Image (spheres, rainbow, N blue to C red):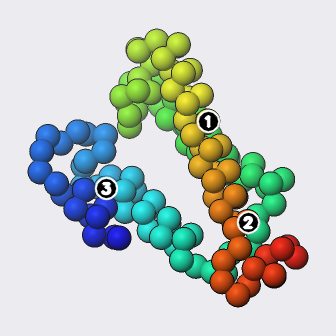
Amino acid sequence: MPTAPAAFCVQAGPIRRETREPRTCPLHIVFPALALVDWLVAPDRPRLSWRELWVVFPYPVLWLAVVLVRGAVDGWVPYGFLLPERGAGSLVAHVVGLLVALTAAGALVWGMSRIPRGTDSGARRAG
Protein backbone atom coordinates (compact mmCIF):
# COMPACT_ATOMS: atom_id res chain seq x y z
CA MET A 1 0.00 0.00 0.00
CA PRO A 2 2.70 2.60 0.79
CA THR A 3 4.10 2.17 -2.73
CA ALA A 4 0.90 3.51 -4.32
CA PRO A 5 1.17 6.92 -2.61
CA ALA A 6 4.87 7.07 -3.45
CA ALA A 7 4.15 6.28 -7.10
CA PHE A 8 1.49 8.99 -7.19
CA CYS A 9 4.03 11.48 -5.86
CA VAL A 10 6.52 10.83 -8.64
CA GLN A 11 4.21 10.06 -11.55
CA ALA A 12 4.98 11.81 -14.79
CA GLY A 13 2.85 14.61 -16.04
CA PRO A 14 2.18 18.25 -15.32
CA ILE A 15 3.15 19.25 -11.81
CA ARG A 16 0.63 21.29 -9.91
CA ARG A 17 2.19 23.38 -7.15
CA GLU A 18 -0.49 22.53 -4.58
CA THR A 19 -0.24 18.74 -4.59
CA ARG A 20 2.69 17.37 -6.53
CA GLU A 21 5.71 19.18 -5.11
CA PRO A 22 8.01 16.61 -3.56
CA ARG A 23 8.02 18.38 -0.20
CA THR A 24 4.22 18.28 0.09
CA CYS A 25 3.82 14.68 -1.02
CA PRO A 26 4.53 13.14 2.41
CA LEU A 27 2.04 15.51 4.05
CA HIS A 28 -0.79 15.11 1.54
CA ILE A 29 -0.33 11.56 0.24
CA VAL A 30 2.01 9.32 2.23
CA PHE A 31 1.07 10.16 5.84
CA PRO A 32 -2.70 9.97 5.26
CA ALA A 33 -2.29 6.62 3.50
CA LEU A 34 -0.17 5.26 6.34
CA ALA A 35 -2.65 6.55 8.92
CA LEU A 36 -5.46 4.77 7.07
CA VAL A 37 -3.48 1.53 6.98
CA ASP A 38 -2.76 1.89 10.71
CA TRP A 39 -6.45 2.40 11.48
CA LEU A 40 -7.46 -0.55 9.35
CA VAL A 41 -4.99 -3.12 10.67
CA ALA A 42 -4.27 -2.14 14.30
CA PRO A 43 -6.67 -4.07 16.57
CA ASP A 44 -5.91 -2.11 19.75
CA ARG A 45 -8.06 0.96 19.18
CA PRO A 46 -10.48 1.94 21.95
CA ARG A 47 -13.95 3.28 21.17
CA LEU A 48 -13.88 7.04 20.83
CA SER A 49 -16.56 9.01 22.62
CA TRP A 50 -18.69 11.20 20.34
CA ARG A 51 -18.44 13.93 22.97
CA GLU A 52 -14.73 14.18 22.14
CA LEU A 53 -15.15 14.72 18.39
CA TRP A 54 -14.32 18.39 18.96
CA VAL A 55 -10.62 17.47 19.31
CA VAL A 56 -10.29 17.33 15.52
CA PHE A 57 -10.94 21.09 15.24
CA PRO A 58 -8.43 23.21 17.22
CA TYR A 59 -5.29 22.61 15.15
CA PRO A 60 -6.89 22.93 11.67
CA VAL A 61 -8.94 25.97 12.71
CA LEU A 62 -5.86 27.65 14.21
CA TRP A 63 -3.86 26.79 11.08
CA LEU A 64 -6.59 28.24 8.89
CA ALA A 65 -6.72 31.43 10.97
CA VAL A 66 -2.94 31.90 10.72
CA VAL A 67 -3.01 31.26 6.95
CA LEU A 68 -5.84 33.75 6.41
CA VAL A 69 -4.14 36.44 8.52
CA ARG A 70 -0.86 35.88 6.70
CA GLY A 71 -2.67 36.00 3.36
CA ALA A 72 -4.23 39.32 4.31
CA VAL A 73 -0.88 40.73 5.46
CA ASP A 74 1.55 39.60 2.76
CA GLY A 75 -0.63 37.97 0.11
CA TRP A 76 0.85 34.45 0.41
CA VAL A 77 -1.33 31.42 1.09
CA PRO A 78 -0.37 27.78 0.56
CA TYR A 79 -3.44 27.01 -1.56
CA GLY A 80 -4.86 29.14 -4.35
CA PHE A 81 -8.45 28.61 -3.22
CA LEU A 82 -7.64 30.55 -0.02
CA LEU A 83 -6.54 33.69 -1.84
CA PRO A 84 -8.46 36.69 -0.45
CA GLU A 85 -8.61 38.38 -3.87
CA ARG A 86 -10.92 35.62 -5.14
CA GLY A 87 -13.65 37.23 -3.09
CA ALA A 88 -15.25 36.76 0.30
CA GLY A 89 -17.90 34.40 -1.05
CA SER A 90 -15.33 32.02 -2.50
CA LEU A 91 -13.24 32.16 0.65
CA VAL A 92 -16.22 31.49 2.94
CA ALA A 93 -17.43 28.64 0.72
CA HIS A 94 -14.00 26.99 0.76
CA VAL A 95 -13.57 27.43 4.52
CA VAL A 96 -17.02 25.96 5.16
CA GLY A 97 -16.23 23.11 2.76
CA LEU A 98 -12.97 22.41 4.58
CA LEU A 99 -14.73 22.36 7.95
CA VAL A 100 -17.45 20.04 6.63
CA ALA A 101 -14.79 17.70 5.20
CA LEU A 102 -12.91 17.81 8.51
CA THR A 103 -16.09 16.96 10.42
CA ALA A 104 -16.86 14.10 8.03
CA ALA A 105 -13.31 12.71 8.28
CA GLY A 106 -13.41 12.94 12.08
CA ALA A 107 -16.82 11.25 12.21
CA LEU A 108 -15.50 8.48 9.94
CA VAL A 109 -12.58 7.85 12.29
CA TRP A 110 -14.90 7.94 15.31
CA GLY A 111 -17.27 5.53 13.59
CA MET A 112 -14.42 3.21 12.62
CA SER A 113 -13.36 3.07 16.26
CA ARG A 114 -16.71 1.45 17.05
CA ILE A 115 -16.35 -1.42 14.58
CA PRO A 116 -15.40 -4.54 16.53
CA ARG A 117 -12.20 -6.13 15.25
CA GLY A 118 -10.24 -9.13 16.42
CA THR A 119 -10.48 -10.62 19.88
CA ASP A 120 -10.72 -7.39 21.83
CA SER A 121 -14.26 -6.45 20.65
CA GLY A 122 -15.70 -7.17 24.12
CA ALA A 123 -13.25 -4.73 25.70
CA ARG A 124 -14.26 -2.08 23.15
CA ARG A 125 -17.91 -2.25 24.14
CA ALA A 126 -17.02 -1.64 27.77
CA GLY A 127 -15.28 1.69 26.94
What is the quadrant of the C terminus in the image? Answer: bottom right
Foreground residue among 95 and 114: 114
Q: How far apart are marks 2 and 1 (CA)?
A: 21 Å
Q: At 31% from the left edge and 40% from the top edge, which residue is drawn? A: 18
Snapshot quadrant of residue 64: top right
Q: How many labels does the image show?
A: 3
Q: Where is residue 31 in the image (x, y as percent from the top left)?
A: 42, 63
Compared across the picture, whether 46 is left or right of 18 comes to: right
Q: Which residue lies furthest to the bottom in this view?
A: 119
Mark 1, other Cα within 10 Å: few <14 / some 14–19 / many ≥20: few
Q: Mark 2 or 1 closer to N-term?
A: 1
**Residue 45 in picture, x, y percent from top left:** 68, 75
Pick the front one: 78 or 119: 119
| Separation of marks 1 and 3 at Cα, in angstroms | 23 Å
The residue under the point 75% across, 52% down is 53
Is the residue marked by circle 3 packed among few (<14), some (14-19), or many (20+) residues within 10 Å?
A: some
Under circle 3, the secondary element is helix
Element marked by disc 2 = loop
Q: Residue 114 carries which label?
A: 2
Discs 1/3, front:
1
First-in-chain label (1 vs 3)? 3
For the residues bearing labels 2 and 1, Cβ distance under 8 angstroms: no
Q: In which quarter of the image is residue 75?
A: top left
Q: Nearer the viewer, mark 3 or mark 2?
A: 2
Asked if residue 114 can be seen in this view, the reply is yes
User: Residue at 48% of width from left, 70% of height from top?
Assistant: 37
Vertical relation: 43 (above or below) 15: below
Q: Where is residue 86 in the image (x, y as percent from the top left)?
A: 41, 15
| Residue topped by disc 1 | 100
Most extreme residue toward the right is: 126
Q: Tell me the residue that label 3 is attached to.
A: 25
The N terminus - image quarter: bottom left
